[in-house]
Image (cartoon, grey):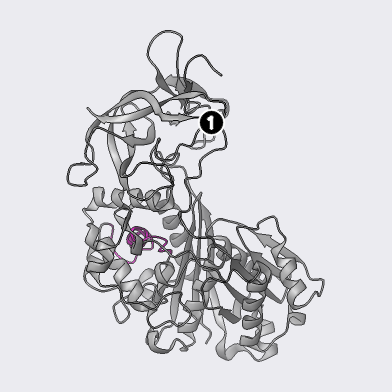
Amino acid sequence: MADAYIVGVDMIKFGRFPEKSVPQLGAEAALLALDDCGLSIKDMEALYCGNLNQASGMVGQRILQEIGQTGIPVVNVSNACATGATAFREAWMSVKADVYDIVLAVGVEQMGRGLLGGGGGSKGISKEGLLGSGTMPSVFAEAGLEHTRNHGTTFEQFAKVSVKNHHHSTMNAKAMYQIETPLEVVMNAEMISYPNTKLMCSVNVDGSAAAVVASEQKVRELGLMDRAVKVRASVLTSDPWQERDLVMPDVNSCTQMASKAAYEMAGVGPEDLDLVELHDCFATAEILHYENLGLCEEGGAGRLIDDGEVELGGRIPVNVSGGLLSKGHPLGATGIANIYEVSTHLRGEAGRRQVEDAKIGLTHVIGLGSACGIHILEKAA
Amino acid sequence: MSDGPLPVVSYLKIPEEGEPYLEGHRCDECGSVYLGERQHCSKCGARDSMSTIQLSNRGSLYSYSIVHRSFPGIDVPYISAIVDLDGGGTIKGNLIGIEADPEKISFGMPVEVVFDDALGRKDADGNSYLSYFFKPA
């Protein structure tokens, strides 16, 4: 099968836009991505649209009602925080399968503020604070302390993730925040669910991102190979059975499975990566994924953050965009925003935060419940 | 309204006589233990292979978080605990009877499952509920 390429990709600056509708936000990113490759909606043969909070609201069609109703097929995708990556993967598959030559993928989300999760069932009484906690900060605190249990990871090591990602975001104008947060500030911020303080929780923001995916033949025909990014691997997994998964959502094994499959598909290993954008929905989560993605040996994640290997300029920079912690986490857009970030580095267009000489990068998202999406991208030759 | 308290979850059983207990299901094929009602096994895929079992009221702390921010009306801080029950099954609940301080909490510490009123919470019809909690054993 011939390769599929990203030819246009972009995201809006993440923020809070209550005055705009979800389709309007999605339309902005779609137009940016089309502009990035000098094409029009009339060139697109299909649209894959990822959105969570209006999953039954035909968001993809409403985006076309904003930018051009050409009658193309639209698939609306919902897969928790892996929604954007799943929409992108559907687009990629349609090109790989030779059904279409060039398609558009959009991820978009408008978020409220406050805690996610912990709503409980509709019957009886609320279980929150009675049968433990179902809020996302707690769930990921418990996953983090499992790592502490197994490897002795400290509160300070978890906090260093936030210091790093907030620092990275000071170089990203499209991030929600551009604010340095020293270690003592992160550790002394309001405790939400130990060991996650407020600055160790991702930011609920509105956002959108989009990508144009095309077949090799189409890219050559359009003369767009110069800035094209090759999709070396696209993998989606669900959570395999784990003995505790009824009460402790498992983000580890689905990531381990997905990364193994992605490295095999791409014919590369973690040592070949120049940068990684992974799912730092909470600082605790990022630590887990260093190991799940094979960036270090099992139990080595604490050392990796201590030694600065995952900082910009380090051995394997992680979340140079600022990550979900500081760039923000508009659920349905996140998976494509990660792809935008890695593509931008592969193109050498990342400005102050550019990872030098980046050739291969990996994106990772987790949707709790669970879904893991991984893409490995490479600058086209 | 019901005469006595209702169970907070379907797998908390309140027998006519005897003590309340947690109910699980064990797969006859692979031995996996699940909380509550279950027809098929999601580990090995066996169909109609489940036997009802009474889960132990003893276990050990696997992981936890200390919740400082929750929804309005919920007392904080509290410990959200994940407990591996002796003999199989993992459940989540509030760990009580110990200070909400990571220095005081140790992984693997033995705990007991105790049953008590659901912190005074009542449903729309005014029913009381019986819940379970963990206490250091």
Where B15 sits versus A22, above or below? above
Examine the image and state in which quarter residue B105 appears.
top left
Q: Quadrant of the N terminus of chain B?
A: top right
**Image: magenta residue range:** A279-298
Determine which residue is flagged by label 1. A124
Q: Residue at x 33, y 58 (%)?
A: A284
Given residues A325 and A346, the one toward you in this image is A325
Q: Residue A290: within the magenta?
A: yes
The residue at the point 44 percent across, 62 percent down is A259
Which quarter of the figure has residue A177?
Answer: bottom left
Type of residue at label 1? Gly
* Chain of the residue displaying label 1: A
On the question of residue A277 being in view, the answer is no
In the image: residue A253, left or right of residue A145: right
- Residue under the point 39% across and 72% down: A319
Q: Position of residue A353 (x, y in %)?
A: 38, 84
Placement of the C terminus of chain B among the 4 image quadrants: top left
Q: Nearer the viewer, residue A166 or A1?
A: A166
The residue at the far left in this view is B103
Point out residue B89 in the picture as x, y percentages from the top left corner: 38, 31
Quick one: label 1, few (<14), some, or many (20+) residues within 10 Å? some
Q: Is residue A71 magenta?
A: no
